[in-house]
Amino acid sequence: MHTAALNGLAEALKMLLAEGANKDAAANDGFTPMIIAAQKGHAEVLKMLLAAGANKDAAYNDGATPILMAAAKGQAEVLKMLLAAGANKDAARNDGTTPMYVAAQNAQRS
């Protein structure tokens, strides 16, 4: 699942989901396929994970959620999808950093 999410391999993800793969499996560092797809901007993969009921608010070990990772990486399409799906827009990292904060940081750099 993680490799499919990382590389945007929607067909592979579709097959894995059909075979019952764990859509919320977390690596030792807490990364889930949803977090990876959000960070990489793989909208089709993210859409499939959302449709399969993957946890849109699962957090990496530092507290970062898919919506925060999308905001941090400037993934606007994915960010819109997560907001539309009801992801927690106020979920903060362990250090208090919010999606709005990282989005504002990125805007300031542009």
Image (cartoon, rainbow, N blue to C red):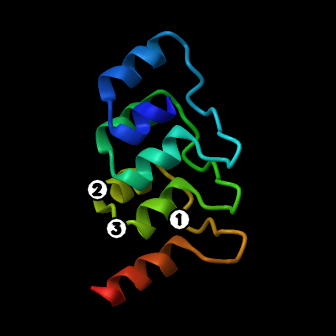
Q: Amino acid at mark 3?
A: Gly
Above or below for 82 versus 93: above
Disc 3: CA contacts within 10 A as few (<14), some (14-19) or many (>=20)? some
What percent of the width, then of the height, locates residue 27? 65, 40
Q: Is residue 73 left or right of residue 91?
A: left
The reply, left or right, for residue 28 in relation to residue 51 is right
x 69%, y 63%: residue: 62
Which residue extends farthest top? 19
Mark 2 crowd level (few <14, some 14–19, many ≥20, 10 Å Cα): few
Check residue 100 in the rendering and tell me which mark sits there, or answer none: none
Residue at the (36%, 21%) spot, across then down: 12
Give the SS element for disc 3. loop
Helix or strand or loop: what does disc 2 sit on?
helix
Residue at numbered disc 3: 74
Which of discs 2 and 1 lies nearer the camera? The answer is 2
| Residue 77, numbered circle | 2
Question: What amino acid is at disc 1?
Answer: Lys
Residue at the (48%, 47%) spot, across then down? 36
Which quadrant of the figure has residue 104? bottom left
Where, by quadrant of the figure, is residue 45 drawn?
A: top left
Residue 78 spot, x, y in % from top left:
35, 53
Numbered-mark total: 3
For residue 89, the mark is 1
Mark toward the viewer: 1 or 3 = 3
Amino acid at pointer 2: Glu
The disc, 1 or 3, on the residue closer to the chain's N-terminal end is 3
